[in-house]
Image (cartoon, grey):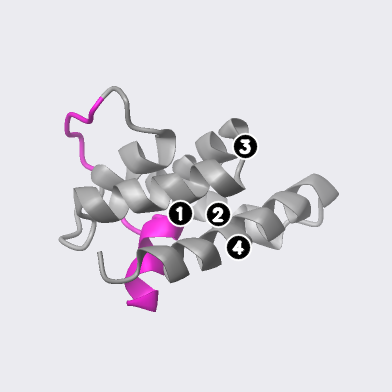
Amino acid sequence: MKKIILAVTLGVMAIPLMPVSASAGPIESACLRMDRTQATRSMCRCIDSVAQRTLTRAEQRRAATFFRDPQRAQDVRMSRNARDNEFWTRYRAFGDAAERMCAGR
């Protein structure tokens, strides 16, 4: 389960185009576009809910870009920029919380 949630949060898969609810947050929208059977509406909604509690709206949008471009996540993780490092710390905390709260959905 940890690998599934990590894959969803890091967005290791490309996002095919598909319609998404207008009320979905950026993480939920990106998650729902993933071509993975584990990316269910319930799982994506849970992960988005955790994102809303742990990341700012701007950070959520930034994290959602990782679903389309996993290399971006790697670049941020490896960055020496203090701002990127602070974001990565919060992003990892979000991923850990999502893993705990959304397992089994």
Residue contact between numbered discs 2 and 3, judged by CB atoms under 8 Å: no
Question: Are the residues at dot 4 and dot 1 in contact (C-beta closer than 8 Å)?
Answer: no
Q: CA distance from mark 3 to mark 1?
A: 20 Å
Residue 35 to residue 20: above or below: below
Choose the circle earlier in sequence order: 4 or 3: 3
Q: Amino acid at mark 3?
A: Thr
Q: Residue at x 33, y 32 (%)?
A: 24
- Cα separation between marks 2 and 4: 11 Å
The numbered disc on residue 92 is: 4
Quadrant in the picture for residue 93: bottom right
Disc 2/disc 3 C-alpha distance (Å) = 17 Å
What is the magenta range? 1-21
SS category of the residue bearing label 4: helix
Foreground mark, 2 or 3, reads 3
The earlier-in-sequence mark between 2 and 4 is 2
Residue situated in front as seen by the camera: 33 or 16: 33
Instruction: Identify the residue at image location x=81%, y=57%.
Output: 80
Q: Are marks 1 and 2 in contact (CB under 8 Å)?
A: yes
Question: Upstream in the sequence, badge 2 or badge 3?
Answer: 3
Q: What residue occupies the far top of the structure in this picture?
A: 22
- The image shows a total of numbered marks equal to 4
Q: Amino acid at mark 4?
A: Arg
Q: Which one is closest to the eye, mark 2 or mark 4?
A: 4
Q: Which mark is residue 70?
A: 1
Question: Which residue, given by chain and number where applicable, does mark 2 sit on?
Answer: 73
Residue for badge 3 = 56
**Is residue 15 among what the camera can see?**
no
Secondary structure beneath label 1: helix
